[in-house]
Image (tube, helix red, strand yellow):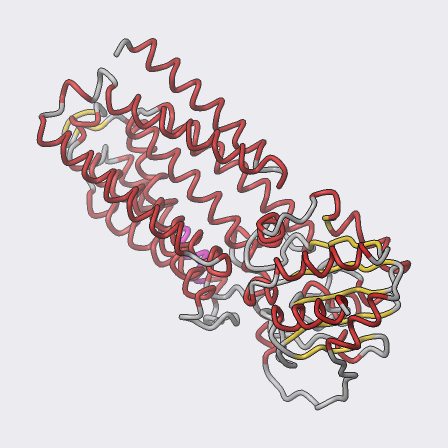
Amino acid sequence: MNPNIAALLYLVSGILFILALRGLSSPATSRTGNRYGMIGMAIAVVTTLVSPSVLPGLDPVTVAMILVAIAIGGGIGAVIARRVAMTAMPQLVAAFHSLVGMAAVLVAFGALYSPDNYGIGTAGHLHAQSLVEMGIGVVIGAITFSGSIIAFAKLNGNMSGAPIMLPARHLLNIALIAAIVGLIAFFIVTGGEALWAFWVATGLAFVIGITLIIPIGGADMPVVVSMLNSYSGWAAAGIGFTLQNTALIITGSLVGSSGAILSYIMCKGMNRSFISVILGGFGGDSAAAAAGGTKEARPVKQGSADDASFIMKNAGSVIIVPGYGMAVSQAQHALREMADLLKEEGVKVSYAIHPVAGRMPGHMNVLLAEANVPYDEVFELEDINSAFPQADVAFVIGANDVTNPAAKTDKASPIYGMPILEVDKAKTVLFVKRGMASGYAGVENELFFRDNTMMLFGDGKKMVEEIVKGLGH
């Protein structure tokens, strides 16, 4: 393939990646965005395999191995995509981020020991810029890998979602960062001859990935997933520089920058410090303090599905607030059916989405889109909060932390300062929940005990289906 044609095809794939990101910014265009991304990646992969710098230097056995590896990886990805439940999507994303991080580490070591195959010099005489690229790439990749593994374990229930506080953790992280920077600098100054420094720096990077993520509590995990997404992008860009692959540089930069921007937006939505996210220093101390102590048993007002159907049928407006409880019970289709019946009764129905509802960004939007909920009925926090005081009913299904008034009133709470959906201002709050357990942040929800709240205990999907039966009478 002519090098100019290859460059043009990489440019086309880059444009398709940009269009993919634009499409993913809205549920209405997300499927089209996904298609653009898939086509762009297919063009980039094929172009790389047949490029003049790759294909002529490969023997038939190597080509066959590459094709087999693509088939195995693609097959595994297809099976996982078809089988994974939406509730497991956050931990799946974290697991995929870890693979990108490890790929960066492996490519860096491959380039270190076989630089002539990468066109970055010869053994013991690597190009200076390549040493810098390898050093940065391996560190970001190692942090992404180990940090994503911890995030996966917390989200998947293999590790406690509560903050795990290490002694003098800030000093430990500072010492690790200083040691990593010093070792990589020494590796570069010696022209890549100090291989031990590269190995030790990589090992310390794996360690700091753990120490950065392990103190972070469940309430902040969506931001962590978003930030790790950004890290994986920069790791991919690092691979691109090492491999001198334009498509990887473009793709990694887009993922890295968009992930960082999303993390910043989410930090604003949660009243968190962006710098603290990067340094792993938020959601920890206060959350750990809140986890201790005993809770006094307090009475709540309990209702039934019939009570809920009667109240909503006679309401003028209902705002539905979905959360992780809806995802767990897979209640989105029953919820849409309930909304359709209410609209037939002349009730105005809308949906309120908190930016961190669920366990990853956009979790609720994807579930509602799966149930074909009209996009014009779905509103973000900043657009819907002003409507709660006029709403007759706020129907909350499993959205715990993001509706907790303690975020506005309790300065000792780990979620204090986080903007919430102000469902407590509705005339009546119907809260569907299995029991009185606290949310993922480990904080008891003050909303349960408000005079205008009625608790509907039970499985989310079954409760909504019972309400649907009541509305159909």
Q: Is residue 220 left or right of residue 416?
A: left
Residue at 32% x, 43% y is: 138
Q: Is residue 54 left or right of residue 44?
A: left
Residue at 34% x, 30% y is: 240
Residue 211 rendering spot, x and y as whole percentages: 43, 62
| Magenta stretch encompasses residue 278 | no
Q: What is the chief secondary structure element of the magenta stretch?
A: helix
The residue stretch that appears in magenta = 172-179
The quarter of the picture where the N terminus appears is top left
Q: Toward which corner of the image does residue 349 lie, by quadrant? A: bottom right
Question: Relative to 95, is 135 above or below?
Answer: above
Question: Relative to 267, is 65 above or below?
Answer: above
Residue 7 rendering spot, x and y as whole percentages: 36, 14
Residue 414 rendering spot, x and y as whole percentages: 65, 68
Can residue 275 be seen at all in this image of the molecule? no
The quarter of the picture where the C terminus appears is bottom right
Q: Nearer the viewer, residue 187 or 284?
A: 284
Question: Relative to 108, is 454 above or below?
Answer: below
Q: Is residue 187 left or right of residue 353?
A: left
Q: Is residue 226 left or right of residue 266?
A: left
Q: How many marks?
A: 0
Can residue 263 be seen at all in this image of the molecule? yes
Q: Nearer the viewer, residue 282 or 252?
A: 252
Residue at 63% x, 38% y is: 28
Residue 429 rendering spot, x and y as whole percentages: 80, 70
